[in-house]
Amino acid sequence: MNDPSAPAGAFAGESIGGSGFATPGIVSAQDVSGYMDAAETLASGNAGKLASGLSCDPALQGDAMCAKQFVEGFGRRAYRRRLTPAEVADLLQVFTEAGALPGNVTFTDKLQLLVRAILQSPQFLYHWELGLSAPHVTNGAIRLTPYEVASRLSYFLWSSMPDEELLGAAEANRLGTPSSLAAEVTRMLQDPKARDTVTSFHSQWLRLDNVLRITKDPTTYPLFNDALRRDMKAENAAFVNHVLLDSDAKLATLLGATFSFVNEPLAKLYGVAGVTGTGLRKVALDASERAGILTQTALLSTTANAYEASLILRGQLLREQFLCQPLAPPPAVVPPLPALAPGQSLRERSKAHMTNASCKVCHELIDPIGYGFGNYDAIGAYRTTEAGKAIDASGSISGLDGSDQSFNGPAELAALLSNSNQVKNCIAKQWFRFAFRRAELPEDAPSLSSAFDAFEKADYDIRTLLSALAQSPSFSYRSLAPGELSQ
Amino acid sequence: MKFQRRNFLAAFGASAAFLPILEAERLEAVTLGTAKRLILMAWPNGVIPEYFWPQGGWPTADATSFTINTGEQSVLKPLIPHQQDILIAGGLRYENQTAGQGHASLPMMFTGVEGASIDGTISDGVPLSAGGPSVDMYVADHIANTSPLAFHSLQLQALKHNGNDRFCSFRGTTIGGLPNAPEPEADPTKLFAKLFGVGQFADPASLERLRLERKSVFDYVGRNLESLGSRMGTDDKAKIQAHIQAIRDVEGQLAGLVASCTKPDAPDPAQDYLNAAYTPLIPTIHKLQADMVVAAMACDLTRVASLLWADSSNGGYSFFWLGNDFVTGRDADNAGSGGPLRQHHEIAHHAHESPENLRRKNLVDQWFFSQFAYILEKLKAVKEGSGTMLDNSAVLCANVFAEGGSHSITDLPWVLGGSLGGYFKTGRYLRYTGGKAGEQASHVGLLKALANGMGAQGDAFGDPKFGGEHASLRA
């Protein structure tokens, strides 16, 4: 309803599932109360618009006729498909019964009740991929209805419901071919709604929302405050949207760009002169100091502790999120690292990990990548010395594409990652998980591989990857759930 | 299962004369003071045994005349005024968990079965959550089926947290890899609105209209859930059933509103309760939540509640109110912790490093027991029949594990308050809760006793292999 008060923002939190991206939990009583409150707030807050939006006049055509028009129109948007006659009849029954409520009941009161019912209904709240009757299984798969494909597209690219054009395409059965899906993806990525989705993917993938929660020691980092936290998030959002939607969308740009978007406080952190005010603008950065998303302030701040940077957290993020190699959690009782000795660098202290066999097992996968980030303090500012000594930013990635590969500093690291098959495959997988809100299964292998081929042919253009995922078989088919009956 | 519901007495505008039989019995039960209540509290990071157990050491015998240490660092000191109303159950251990689960014990601590795997992890990367209902939910389901109240139960959390270790109360085993747990409420303002808000204290005519409108909507939603759910696979069907159950719970809230309720003080709308980590706001939240739980029970809006103090490791409490050295002076080397301030988890891990660290650990634990003592006091302040509401309640103050540094899960430092209408014999310190010298007894035996004491068929709770109710607890 485009309500600026956004009452639905009050819903209970999501859990982080096995795919690494947010997955909704099970609906609890608190959620039901939340849906109820939001639906009631939206209905009463928009009461005036409900009747005036109708082309039907209850005084002339009767309440029932106008209610039917309302149910069919609003219901179609909310349920992302045309309602069945039985569904229309059921809602009209709610409308009719509302006439028996005690007190004065106006036509608008009854429309409000319909809005509340529709917004709390499972057809609105859930992604239904059940068709309208028990499904046909062909070659182990069930083809989704055009409406269901439209919903998948819309929640993938917009995190929101289909618009009129997309619903129209579903209604006319125009989402059945790869080329028609590709055309929709192109159109949808040009819509401003795609920007929130691009932001959300990167926030979840790189765990950047933590920047709003972490604390920094105020004596060591006096610049770090609430405004700067939000600026850091905004910097990443501006950058990823620019690269993916307004620029060449190349993976190499995402990882290696030597520009970013800064305002005055961020410019101070980056050491860029001449930027004033709170608005963000695109600036060139020193190519020897910065490389795309890898060296942005939000990422570097969240992969750091309160007093000091953390080579471990940075190495871990790269290993897990760019190489798709999740690490086992540390044992339950790990003694804390000793305090930094005077004149000791983070890199020197982490050497202890390599002398203890049980630490080394994991840390040899983590720490040598983290070494490449030695030049950034706990809020992402560039430094050339630590503990009075020049920083050694040479590192290595073990087992990258099957061999150990070394690099020196973030620019070389970015080049290494951008050229790695393993990394490119991992990025494709991350987008798959985001698009489908689940981890990939063995039966998704052909879809992933066709999407990767398209990604490769386009010289790793991420927009092409998104389009290829939408055109893949996994996007238009599903399998029969255990316990589900088919025809 | 049919969706159309029983018990919409308010929706039909019934006066007291038309109350269904069960409803009349319920009101009578409250008037006569026979309604029983169950409150569970969970908090993490263990205790230092020497400063916890009475008589300054490990329990040596069942004692009816035991002495709580009076020293400055005595963890149970806040319970001295309540000694006759508590039962210290020594020698309990988790048998539904493997050793070393530590922080990750949280989801299993109030259940009687082993954990089930989830799609995601608990603290310490353990991918397990509850494999069955927790005892509070088990009891609340029983109450909902026999004499439903406005609120099936309450689940509160003192500090907003999004991880999978934000739950100690579970409806049942996991569904499709997700914990089957109600979202705990962390916002005192929302809790107040829900329990004592405008809706419930509105004029009768508009309240009546609101109830009827909501009933109509819920009936519609329920019909649709049932018909769509019937076509789904097993996991999804279970999710839909959970949604239907949640609607019933909320629907029930519309019915059982009691006019003579005394509202507690409302939370301050200017406070940012949801961002209370590392702030001095925590004790205010504890007090607001305790006051509201006790008031809701005094009004018989609900009889079952759980309070989770933070989460399974609690890196978010910095104890400003215990003194400046509890907050600042943190060791800079504790990599991985979120804040620049000393906090609960860190204080527990460093307890043995110096006398100052040990003192901080003990005083922090003592403070948690003062929070338990506060609830006992509030319950005692409500007169019921010839006694107090505490006499009709069981309040379990339970740490997630036993000893802070080692994360052990034997000799759990659990204390029970209230006799649950004479079901438990309080004023005792039990050495062998399981009845056998030198053996640890399953914590499930205590949970079963809680369920039985609440009249909810405790013998059917949990996996039978963990044994029966511990008779030693009984009066």
Image (cartoon, rainbow, N blue to C red):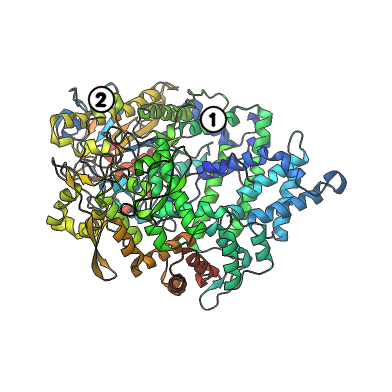
Above/below status of B304 relative to A335: above
Residue B342 drawn at (x, y percent):
26, 34
Pinpoint the chain carrying mark 2: B
- Magenta stretch bounds: B332-340
Q: How crowded is mark 2: few (under 14 residues within 10 Å), some or many (20 or more)?
A: few
Above/below status of A86 relative to A306: below
Quarter of the image for residue B168 reads: top left
Q: Name the outermost residue toward the right.
A: A60
Viewer-proximal residue, A396 or B370? A396
Above/below status of B70 relative to B171: above
Residue B282 among those drawn in magenta: no
The numbered disc on residue B324 is 2
Viewer-proximal residue, B15 or B318? B318
| Of labels 1 and 2, the one closer to you | 2
Query: Callout 2, which amino acid?
Result: Asn
Query: Callout 1, which amino acid?
Result: Leu
Residue B339 among those drawn in magenta: yes
Residue B243 drawn at (x, y percent):
53, 50
- Which residue is at 33% across, 35% downward? B396
Residue B246 drawn at (x, y percent):
52, 46
Quarter of the image for residue A214 reads: top left
Q: Name the outermost residue toward the front.
A: A274
The numbered mark, 1 or 2, whose residue comes first in the sequence reads: 1
Secondary structure at badge 2 equals helix
Q: Is the magenta stretch mostly helix, strand or loop?
A: loop
Viewer-proximal residue, A26 or B15? A26
- Which residue is at 64% across, 37% downward? B211
Label 1: which residue? B27
Residue A18 in sight from this viewpoint: no
